Amino acid sequence: MTTDEEMELDSLEGVGPVTKQKLHEAGIYSIMDLAARGVGEVADSINGDTAKASELINKARTKLSDLGVLAKDFVSARELFQKRQSIERVSTGSKNLDTLLGGGVETGAVTEFYGEFGSGKSQICHTLAVMVQESKEKGGLSAGALYVDTEGTFRPERIAEIAEARGTDPGKVLDNIIVAKAYNSAHQELIVREVGRQIERTKLKLVVVDSAVAHYRAEFLGRGTLAERQQRLNRFMHMLVRDAEVYGVVVVVTNQVQSSPDFFFGDPTRATGGHVVAHTSTYRLYLRKASKSRIARMVDSPYHPEGEAVFVINSKGVDDPSEDSPRKRSGS
């Protein structure tokens, strides 16, 4: 087991007091945090020295590999398969939705839920923030959550209602959720830079960003700003990917939708953010309303079959429909 001293930046060769201070100012506080950052980001914090930034990141990742915190660079497929058998998951609160996800929302990956207003995106996030605190026997990880709220949708009253309906102490549940309100895209990025530090301090296992693209969509208007928007969004999403992989936490993001004007048949609804969000999300699920129920469809996954799951929203948050309600599930 690693110690706090082994994770200190100054325990890494090449990090002196000046470099350590500069890294701290950039929100990089530990070797784990350094390993999770990109070369450009680290270089910006140490006066643009790309070569040194790359060297420091490689040293950090090598040390974590030697300590057994990170996987080695080259492993056999069998080793990787065996490791994935022990991956932890958090229940969504609905058995149908858990089945669609292969047992729940996965640690070490970014799971994206997108859909129109009222499709259940924020309700899933609220329910996950409660479920992650349950014991493993009940579908949780006995850990806390970090909720990044970009649209003013987080409601502690809803958390308390879900916790009470599921037989959990609302006060304790609320105490174990850290909420960060992001006021613009730059503030949103600043918050995510601090995620690693919060994970190490509180040992949380769930990071929620509700929603990931809203600020970028509102601030970058017109085709002239599209390139800058996508570049910023790409960097933001990759920060989340690195946090998920390095710290082994569940990362859940929600996304808005838009209609594709050149789509003539079928559902013209498309997730915002373009290919940047599509490529960085490990799993993508499309949510839509169906009378009093909601339907989740697996849109993209490295290994899940295409399929759908029916769920409802009630006092317990996300839940399964009653016995007489149909359940949809199909393989590819």
Image: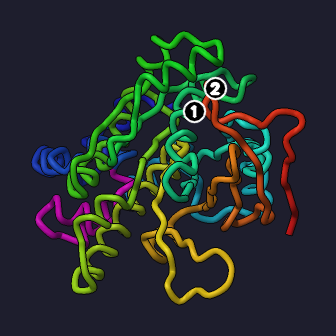
Q: Position of residue 310 (x, y in %)?
A: 76, 48
Q: Position of residue 30 (x, y in %)?
A: 32, 41
* Residue at 30%, 37% in the rendered image: 180
- Residue 204 vs residue 20, the one in the foreground: 204
Q: Position of residue 96 (x, y in %)?
A: 79, 43
- Residue 38 vs residue 191, the one in the foreground: 191
Residue with the mark numbered 2: 316
Q: Which of the two discs, 1 and 2, sits closer to the camera?
A: 2
Q: Find the distance from the CA under tag 1 to the CA under tag 2.
A: 8 Å
Rendered position, 178 above or below 309: above
Rendered position, 139 above or below 33: above
* Residue at 47%, 71% in the rendered image: 258
| Quadrant position of residue 293 | top right
Kind of residue indicated by mark 2: Lys
The local secondary structure at tag 2 comes to loop
Residue with the mark numbered 1: 127
In the picture as drawn, the residue positioned furthest to the front comes out as: 291
Q: Magenta stretch? A: 34-58
Q: Is any atom of residue 155 visible in this view?
A: yes
Rendered position, 228 above or below 41: below
Q: Residues within 10 Å of mark 1 (few under 14, many from 20)?
A: many
- Residue 328 vs residue 303, the one in the foreground: 328
| 12 left or right, relative to 290 | left
